[in-house]
Image (spheres, rainbow, N blue to C red):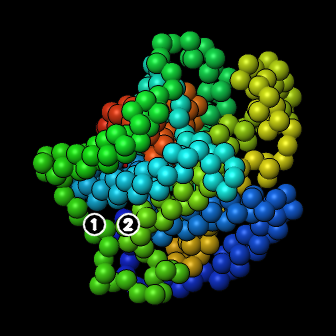
Amino acid sequence: MSAIAQPSAELPRVPNPVQITALLLAMTAIVLLAASVLMISLKQLLLFGIGVGLGISLYHAAFGFTGAYRRAMLEGDISGVTAQLIMLAVAVLLFAPILAQGEAFGRGVGGAVAPVSLSMALGAFLFGIGMQLGGSCASGTLFAAGGGSLRTLLVLVFFCIGAFWGSLDLAWWSQLPGVGSVSLSEHLGWEIALPLQLGALALIYAVMRFFGGTQKRPLWDIGHFRWQTLLRGPWPLLLSALLLALFNWLTLLVAGHPWSITWAFSLWAAKAAVFAGWDPATSGFWSGGFQQAALERSVLQDVTSVMNFGIILGAFLAAALAGRLVKPAGIAFRSLTAAVLGGLIMGYGARLSYGCNIGAFFSGVASTSLHGWVWIACALPGNYIGVRLRPFFRL
């Protein structure tokens, strides 16, 4: 979802000069990739466009999960978490009528509902630790890498490796006890599930305030918002929260399922492994029909991959417009180690827990999946441990 540490939550009011060369590169890359996916289908083009919008929205507000949880734990600043709660509430309301009828524009749609099990809980816990070591979650890794962070690009590489590693072990982990997939709307009915979820989000906010949480970063700073801000940032947290909910809803309408990220990471690493001589037939997971077809097709035919590319390029475009594209710099050894470990742990955890902070938590809760609620309940203790480990790595 990514606070996703780069850029800083305290963005400057005096704009930096637009980085013209980077802006032209970003626009050229977006146009070329858009033309390529249009040759596949209009649907892929629309999803790529949604991805670009997500990347801009994430970058311009420094909207994320990792830093938001860290600030809440260390400083009592619940600004980022509050924005997430609003985002979830809006997404729940947008998703409800579409999922209730089960179709959009004559095509079937389905929510992000996944099994609840011990292995899923462990995966979410591991993901929480990896978030803090890596310094970003799944969406944060994409937009920070697009913003030029060399360290985050390294996190992305090992995120992919970890996700592929997890896919190879998934069959063993899946044998652990679980209760299967539970959709609250199917078990309780929408008339109960919808107010129950909204009430739970309101209760979480009330509990945070009761225990001293404060909003140190305004959700919408009206006094400093200008029309130029839409192009160059920084955006208010509330604007990005609303846009992320809207883009997830659009993904549901166009793709037939909500926004997800980490499947593509597994796929990219698997394709690299095939190129290196690995045989997918040796893996139960990759022997499945969907997985085999994905390995044989171009990544531009994969919905999640196309959206991820859009997020990276959208963030690249936003960073160039803001004049904040990060220039490559050296990485200290301990920070480098944390990046590698964080990426591996997040990737492995995401595969075990059927997604990340986006596919499992955000899209899961919006779909009334019990899995989404259990995911965040297990990821938060992992975040706490990760926060305590950060000083050792001098983060």
Instruction: Please name the amino acid that badge 2 sits on.
Output: Leu
- Residues 159 and 211: in front is 211
Give the x, y percent position of residue 381: 33, 33
Q: Residue visible at 69% across and 72% down?
A: 26
Q: Please, what secondary structure does the residue beneath circle 1 have?
A: loop
Asked if one can make out residue 327 in the rendered structure from this viewpoint, the answer is no
Instruction: Please name the amino acid that badge 1 sits on.
Output: Arg
Left or right: residue 300 versus residue 135 is right
Q: Please, what secondary structure does the residue beneath circle 2 have?
A: helix
User: Residue 237, labelled with which disc?
Assistant: 2
Give the x, y percent position of residue 187: 43, 30
Q: Residue visible at 69% across and 49% down?
A: 107
Question: What is the distance, in whole Å, between disc 2 and disc 1 at their CAs?
Answer: 9 Å
Q: Earlier in the sequence, mark 2 or mark 1?
A: 1
Number of marks in the rendered image: 2
Asked if one can make out residue 39 in the rendered structure from this viewpoint, the answer is yes
Give the x, y percent position of residue 261: 60, 46
Q: Residue visible at 70% across and 63% down?
A: 46
Left or right: residue 339 versus residue 306 is left
Q: Residue visible at 53% across and 85% down?
A: 17
User: Could you tell me if the residues under marks 2 and 1 are in contact, i.e. CB atoms within 8 Å?
Assistant: yes
Graded by Cα atoms within 10 Å as few (under 14), some (14 to 19) or many (20 or more), the crowding at tag 1 reads: some
Residue 4: quarter of image: bottom left
Graded by Cα atoms within 10 Å as few (under 14), some (14 to 19) or many (20 or more), the crowding at tag 2 reads: many
Residue 365 position (above or below residue 25): above
Give the x, y percent position of residue 285: 71, 23
Left or right: residue 159 versus residue 194 is right
User: Residue 217, labelled with which disc?
Assistant: 1
Residue 73 position (above or below residue 118): below
